[in-house]
Image (cartoon, rainbow, N blue to C red):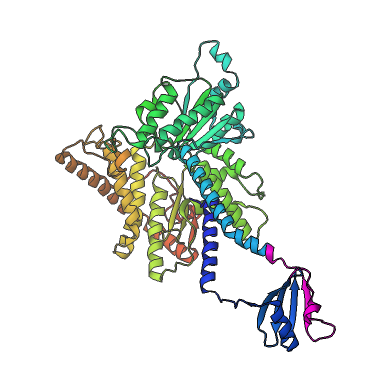
Amino acid sequence: MPQQPGRGFIWIAIAIIGFAALSAFIGPRQQVPEVIAISEVATLVQEGQVKEVVVTNDTELAITKQDDTKLRSTLRTGDDLKDFGITPDKTSIKVEYSTSSAAWASILGNLLVPIIILAVIFAMFRSSQNQNQRAMGFGQARAKLANFSKIRFADVAGQREAKQELMEEVDFLRDPAKFRALGAEIPKGVLLVGPPGTGKTLLAKAVAGEAGVPFFTISASEFVEMFVGVGASRVRDLFAKAKKASPCIIFIDELDAIGRQRGAGLGGGHDEREQTLNQILVEMDGFETDGGVIVMAATNRPDVLDPALLRPGRFDRRVVVDLPTRDERIEVLQVYTKGKPLAKDVDLAGVANQTAGMSPADLKNIMNEAAIFAARKGEKQITQATLHEAAEKVLVGPERPSRVLSDQEKKVTAVHEAGHAIVGHVLPHTDDVHKVSIISRGNALGLTWSLPKEDRHLIGKAKFEDELCMLLGGRLAEMAVFDEATTGASNDLERVTKLARRMVTEYGMSDTLGLRTYGEREHEIFLGRSMGESRDYSEDRAQVIDSEVDQIVKRAETRTKELLTMYRPALDKLTDLLLERETVTGEELTRILEETTGIIKEPVTV
């Protein structure tokens, strides 16, 4: 918390007073001049002991003797220096006249300490006042009244269905009387649901911009404090402000921070988060309701929200903001290329094909990285090669040329990646191999990059089985060439195990276990994804599940071994080419298979 200006002034004043007091005690003490009568001054003058006389205010005399001793004296009213033999023109005594500010200095010196003390008291009073004001404002909402009048739906690329849903909210905010005349009630709560980076907040801003109404924005975490009741107070204050400014929009970001399901046993009835949630429920559809205020919220975890939030009258409209399709990715890329010089060879459709499953935030990051790469290389435009390089960095991590591998490690890596590429290329249900590389990226020593031809929403069992073979291709290629296993396949084996288990327990792809799922995941919202699964099956059934997983992996292993044996010439040739050039494209891989086996990519029966 930043220090308050009044508190800082108090410490400065205390430091000044302490320094002055310390100086008064330990500083050098000056000798106080002796006060003598004017007659004694006349005697000293006659004896020639006076060197200088300074007359201040016509009455005060400061005498300096020949030995530099200081004396003081005073002239009576009407007296003159000549009466005491002090005549500068006839003697060697130096006489000076001055108008001193000693009196004012004395007055100011005497007033300095009281002034400082009064200033300290005043600052302390102001500080206490500020603290009282902060205490009174502790329960006030910290929502920001933002102006997004320049943002429109046209600024949001893609998301056609989401924008159509939200246009109803815009129409109601523009002309609520049209709906009320027919007895229609517009939904009070709109919940934007989707993965991170898909543009939920931008859509909310666009609604406010289209409707031209006030837009109150706040993060859900700002309601929660360590003191019980503060969050509920802030909710009441927020809705009170919104009702005064209606029609308006309240936007709550990351709603799951306070909207998690109640009654989970974590925290009692006085839990601050639950009190805040209760107040939101009452404000949205409780005893005191008012029209003209639409509450919009965003979350990427709708599964953890309390059911009371999702019932009609509250967040009864759910707008799905999903990952963009291929055409929508092209639109997003067009938005983020504005203001960036592009070369003639840039093909945004190719970049969209390369970035399946990426969010608009990821695409924005790719365009920014491409601009950085181009500037680093001294180029004036962003080329297609630069875009591909930026996409690779965002997807799999930056290149690490500083990681130097030994010749043996480099060969093992080449064999490993060649095994992935060959198996992935010849199987019918895997994605096309785009590039194979043994250049280190991120934590990986090599990379086999496959790209889907189109967006896929349903995945069949055959594709899962082919993907298992492709994942095992690296380890089994190492075993076929070197007859030795390495740690390079640890991530592949982890993915194989998870995929095979999900085929059995989630997707019902086991003939032995039947069409059902295994394991309840209702508690993962509180205890984490891995710890939240509870068993709804016996130990005997658990052994059957493990056995089925083992059989799926074993079948994939047998199939992959036979494929690598069949295409061993292509494996050896691709390995040599990787060792020579470090990177091989998908087109070159196709040519290698044509030259060695005559097969490009067709269904393989093993």
Which residue lies at the image location 66% right of the left edge and 50% below the top edge?
Answer: 343
Q: Position of residue 590 (x, y in %)?
A: 47, 52
Toward the viewer: 526 or 550? Answer: 526
Residue 117 is a magenta residue? no
Toward the viewer: 513 or 570? Answer: 513
149 with respect to 180 (left or right): right
388 with respect to 342 (left or right): left
Image quadrant of residue 103? Answer: bottom right
Q: Position of residue 480 (x, y in %)?
A: 31, 60
Which residue lies at the image location 38% right of the left edge and 31% below the top edge?
Answer: 277
Q: Position of residue 252 (x, y in %)?
A: 48, 34
**Camera sees residue 539:** yes
Magenta-colored span: 76-103
Image vertical order of residue 189 relative to residue 140, above or below: above
Toward the viewer: 477 or 359? Answer: 359
Q: Main secondary structure of the magenta part?
A: loop
Residue placed furthest toward the left: 540
Toward the viewer: 404 or 175? Answer: 175
Residue 77 is a magenta residue? yes
Q: Position of residue 251 (x, y in %)?
A: 50, 33
